[in-house]
Image (cartoon, grey):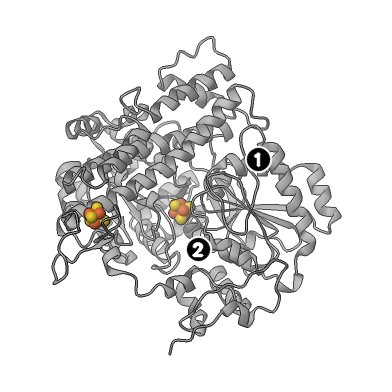
Amino acid sequence: MNISVVIHELVCDNHQPGCSLLDVRHEEAAIMDQYQEFSIAADAQSMLKKAHDDGVVTAWDRARMQQPQCQFCKSGLSCRVCAMGPCRIDPHGKGAHYGVCGADADIIAARNLSRMVAAGSASHSDHARDLVEVLYSVGKGKAPGYEIKDLEKLKRVATEYGIAINGLSDKELAVKLAESMMEDFGMKKGRVTFVGRAPKQRIELWEKLNVVPRGIDRETTETMHRTHMGVDNDYVSLLLHAVRNSLSDGYGGSMIGTELSDILFGTPKPGLSTVNLGVLKEDHVNILVHGHNPVVSEMIGLAVEDGEMIKLAQSKGAKGINLAGLCCTGSELMMRKKIPMAGNHLMTELTIVTGAVESIIVDYQCVMPALGQVAQCYHTKLYSTSNKAKFPFMEHVEFNPENAKEQAFKMVHASIENYVRRNKDRVSIPVSPVKSMTGFSVESIVGALGGSLAPLIDAIKAGKIKGAVGVVGCNNPKIRQDYGHVGLIKRLIANDILVLTTGCANVAAGKAGLQVPEAKNLAGPGLKEICGLLNIPPSLHVGSCVDNSRIVVIACALANALGVDIDKLPLAGAAPEWYSEKAVAIAFYVMASGIYTVLGVMPPVGGSTNVTKLATSGLKDVFGASFAVEANPDRAADLIIAHITEKRKGLGLSA
Ligand code: SF4
Ligand code: SF4
């Protein structure tokens, strides 16, 4: 029976001032009884139960309310590119086989997918642009609180950009590099600088296919142009440009984002931190940072360490201020400062449900607009900081390089003041934190190996490490939370495959105890031996979503060291629980780099036989890599293990 209820009104007896009712219709009020099916994580399960008891609606409830989801959209056969539509087509059935303009399934699916790549590339790249602007402002002396933390890397990257560094002050160098990177966004250079990091063979292939990215913004703009009605109506041509667009992200926006974050905030080094909701402290002011760009969170990190702020917190009855992260901003802080990580994408609402969070300060990307609704039921204050990312029920505190320090202190101050509004009877911190190792930048991996990748190559040749796999990406309520990540990682490490994690996969692996050196005991004998020698986990936290560029840099360096193209190496990528358009851009540039990629959620292309065939097999003939879709982590592991075995044979190595 369908029961429509305003669930919040029924069960919330503790409205905070300004609390508005959540007018959400539930098919079944009892849905939350299924919370154990929603996540493998104890903290999530416990908070889902509390959310149910508190009358709070979460992403899982809303996902349920969307069922059944539109099959046209799901298979990529709906189009709303122009006002003659929207069109929905049914290529194999009795419905319309073409949109009003005549577009068929291949065109519509390829156009939709291309636009996902463009949105993902734009997101990473606009994030990078903000960092370029901070670097420029630091150079001009207009960014109080920010500084160059890794001068050696600034010089190294500037040299890679062809800048004569001798005789320049650090600030002049920062300005020069920022200006040169700005040119990467346009079309002045004709080729994005970091493409030069790819192996010679791969660059030649891209040149032959005409997919070398010319400028970061240029490729995204061209995708939007090509996908306008009446422009590119050849699905192969559309998808080849989507590849070019994604490469402008992987070797452009994302790579610039990673390198500049290291230059400005320090190149990460290995160390221990903690993860899960247990990182919240009942007797502290808890402040969470969420989003992607460390520009905001680094400054919040400074403010919470300020003696006056700590004294203020103590005057309000708290023992101190506890800063923790969410999603990729959390990964950035964890990598560099070992700040604890409260949770990944699907934990963001649940952190508020603990009743112990004084504020969440967000920048952008993956911030669910629902946070404001959930916060209405508790005392948590929410702050947005970017003028391009504003949200319902969030106070906006505009951040820019000039005012960042002042604004960070303002928000931390207000968060402390909010501590007295916490209702202690509603606080529940359900678990104890789990240790998790972090900080595996390219530099620190090379450092741990003794200064070069040679020991890793030797271990791969000897079969102690069979290969390496990047397990990356999000949570998606279509997949039991963290199950896809953890199930896959466990199988891979047990088969002597080294795992590199980024984004929300980090949190899943960390919570499952896979990111500490002791996890070597879950690895196969060869990987266990190497992890023991180096005192590293078999699953390495290499950073945030933009830091997938670190994985690409390692792949390029391995290929260059061996004198082969990347597609010859025993490598793979996986995004078991992806949801974001950014993940589509990442999957495209990883595949175009020559790395086989397994997705846990089907992209919306299944309605086009040609696009599906091209993605799952045709691309292999072109790029030496293709996609597979497999939601079951055991079967995904089987696919990857078989692929790595095949690649090892190709290199003349033992299986
Ligand atoms: S572009 Fe073509 S298929 Fe898309 S909405 Fe317009 S008419 Fe329909
Ligand atoms: S991994 Fe996905 S959900 Fe998580 S922060 Fe990155 S893009 Fe967002």
Residue 585 place in picture, x, y as percent: 34, 46
- Tag 2's secondary structure? helix
Q: Look at the picture and state if 379 lies above or below 452.
A: below
The residue that appears at 58% across and 15% down in the rendered structure is: 169
Q: Specify the label residue 299 is tagged with.
A: 1
**Mark 1: amino acid:** Met
Q: In this view, does 375 lie to the left or right of 114?
A: right
Asked if one can make out residue 39 in the rendered structure from this viewpoint, the answer is no
Quarter of the rendered structure image containing ligand 1:
bottom left
Comparing 257 with 379, the one in front is: 379
Question: Which residue is at 42% across, 69% downward?
Answer: 480
**On the rendered structure, is 489 left or right of 148?**
left
> What residue does disc 2 label?
346
Q: Residue furthest bottom?
A: 1
Among the 4 quarters of the image, the one containing residue 184: top left
Residue sitting at x 44%, y 61%? 475
Which is nearer the N-term, disc 1 or disc 2? 1
**In the depicted view, which residue is nearer to us: 456 or 197?**
197
Judge the density around disc 2: few (<14), some (14-19), many (≥20) Cα neighbours within 10 Å: many
Say whether mark 1 is within 8 Å of ligand 2. no
Query: How far from the left and from the top, in percent, is residue 185?
Result: 40, 30
Instruction: Please state which amino acid type lies under the numbered disc 2.
Output: Leu
Instruction: Name the foreground residue: 538 vs 132.
Output: 132
Residue 439 image point, x, y percent? 52, 43
